[in-house]
Image: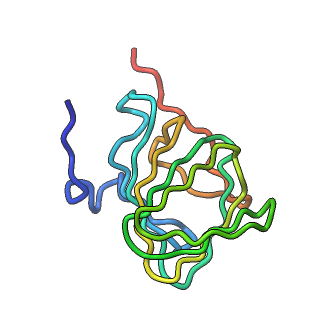
Amino acid sequence: MIVRSFKDIEGTDRHVKAASGTWESKRIVLAKEKVGFSLHETVLYAGTETSMWYANHIEAVLCVEGEAELTDDETGEKHWITPGTMYLLDGHERHTMRPKTDFRCVCVFNPPVTGREDHDENGVYPLLTEPEEV
């Protein structure tokens, strides 16, 4: 059993701040736990814009605080995301988030991330793996 709090991971390598300066993420469950998914609390900052494309992952996102506009960059369709709203990127959709306020969400990734990922120039997380233990 693993018991861990967000407070436990503040300031550690599990507390990732994007090079873009538009978000930070506390990665509470990672690939090294070997449970088949990763779990994060992410905050996207008010007034920013982040374009993403999880070409290598499926992501489910549950908003717990704040408001943001989610745009499906492939169709142009827009959605207003507020607390209690979930979106699932089950088709690897390219998308853009525009938070009106600081936007706090809980995210689940499959396959799990290692904690070292940041979006590349295309908004993609590379598919990183943990080294096998011998």
Colouring method of the image: rainbow
In the shown orientation, is residue 110 left or right of residue 36? right
Which residue is drawn at the image coordinates 49% and 82% (left, top)? 46
Above or below residue 115? Residue 129 is above
Give the percent coordinates (x, y) of residue 39: 40, 46
Above or below residue 25? Residue 132 is above
Give the percent coordinates (x, y) of residue 12: 30, 56
Which residue is drawn at the image coordinates 38% and 71% (left, top)? 65
Which residue is drawn at the image coordinates 38% and 51% (left, top)? 27
Give the percent coordinates (x, y) of residue 130: 47, 31
Q: Quadrant of the C terminus?
A: top left
Quarter of image, res 49: bottom right
Depth order, front residue of 65/57: 65
Quarter of image, res 128: top right
In the shown orientation, is residue 18 left or right of residue 124? left
Above or below residue 124? Residue 127 is above
Which residue is drawn at the image coordinates 21% and 46% (left, top)? 4
Give the percent coordinates (x, y) of residue 57: 61, 41
